[in-house]
Structure formats: C-alpha cells, structure tokens
Image (tube, grey):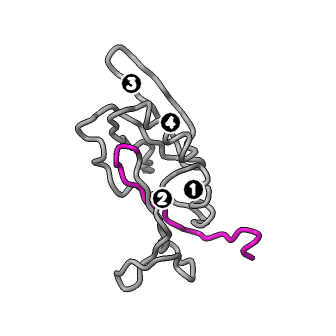
Amino acid sequence: MDWKLELIVVPSADVDRSKAFYIDKLGFDLLVDHEAEDFRVVQLVPPGSACAIALMLNPEASGSVQGLHLIVRNIGAARAELVGRGTDVSDLFHYVEGKQIAGPDPDHTDYATFFSFDDPDGNGWLVQEVGWTPLKDEI
C-alpha cells in the first residue's frame, strides 16, 4: 500500500497576499484558485514537488504552521534564487554536535545544511540540502 502526502494546508490571513508571495517570491506554480459562495482554495506546488500546499483563509491560525521543509540538491543555488526574487531568507547554517553553526556543512552531508524563511503570515519554512549536486562553476 502506497501512502502519498499530496497536500498540506497553510493558514493565511490574506490569501491574495500569500498567493503572490508563493508565486513571486518562491516560484511556486499555481494549480487551483477556486472560489465558491463562502469558500476559496488556492493550491500551489513547489517546482518538482509531488506535494502541494493549500492556502486557506484562517486569520486566527495564520503563522501557526512551522517546520515545513523544502528539499533541494544545491542549497547555495536555491538560496541565491530566492534572494534574487527578493525573498527574505536566513543565512546558511548546519549543526555540529547539536549546535547551530553558520555556513554550509563542509562535506555537503545529506540533511545537514539549512536556511529558513517565513511567509507573510509567519508560517515557517526550512530549506534543506539532500543529494548535493555541484554547479558547473563548483566542479
């Protein structure tokens, strides 16, 4: 039996503002923007991901989702892309013996290097490097 996670609900106080952030600042693709009489759902997906997010209007819960992870193969390139889009992101960091250290993991060990950002509602994301692939200028 396969169990596939395909959708995560992310609460928002302003769905249009959040939609613009995820498309313009993160490069997510819009899958659905459907509005009915008392209901609206906006679904977006990160490039290359099988799992999407659904922005749901819920001002009381906005900012309550923390620790969402995006996985990339080259964290330096991913961070540079988001910074180039005007996204406010943290510096790269890794952990040594449980302590957070500035900069990437020197060996590019899977699951070891991160940066973080928040969406406009304060929902927290981590970007994590797995399966490091150097860019041509890093070889």
Q: Report the amino acid beneath label 3.
A: Arg
Query: For mark 4, does the 10 Å Cα neighbourhood hold few (<14), some (14 to 19), or many (20 or more) residues?
Result: some
User: Separation of disc 1 and disc 4 at Cα?
Assistant: 16 Å
User: Separation of disc 1 and disc 3 at Cα?
Assistant: 30 Å
| Circle 4/circle 3 CB separation < 8 Å | no
User: Separation of disc 2 and disc 1 at Cα?
Assistant: 7 Å
| Circle 1/circle 4 CB separation < 8 Å | no
Labels 2 and 1: the sequence-earlier one: 1
| 69 relative to 61 in the view: left or right | right
Labels 3 and 2: the sequence-earlier one: 3
Stretch in magenta: 120-139
| Circle 1/circle 3 CB separation < 8 Å | no
Q: Report the amino acid beneath label 4.
A: Ala
- Residue 127 placement (x, y as % from top left): 48, 61
Look at the numbered disc 2 and give the secondary structure of its residue. Answer: loop
Label 4 sits on residue? 20
Q: Which mark is residue 89?
A: 2
Q: Nearer the viewer, residue 9 or 5?
A: 9
Labels 4 and 2: the sequence-earlier one: 4
User: Separation of disc 3 and disc 2 at Cα?
Assistant: 29 Å
Residue at 44% from the left image edge and 61% from the top image edge? 116
Label 1 sits on residue? 83
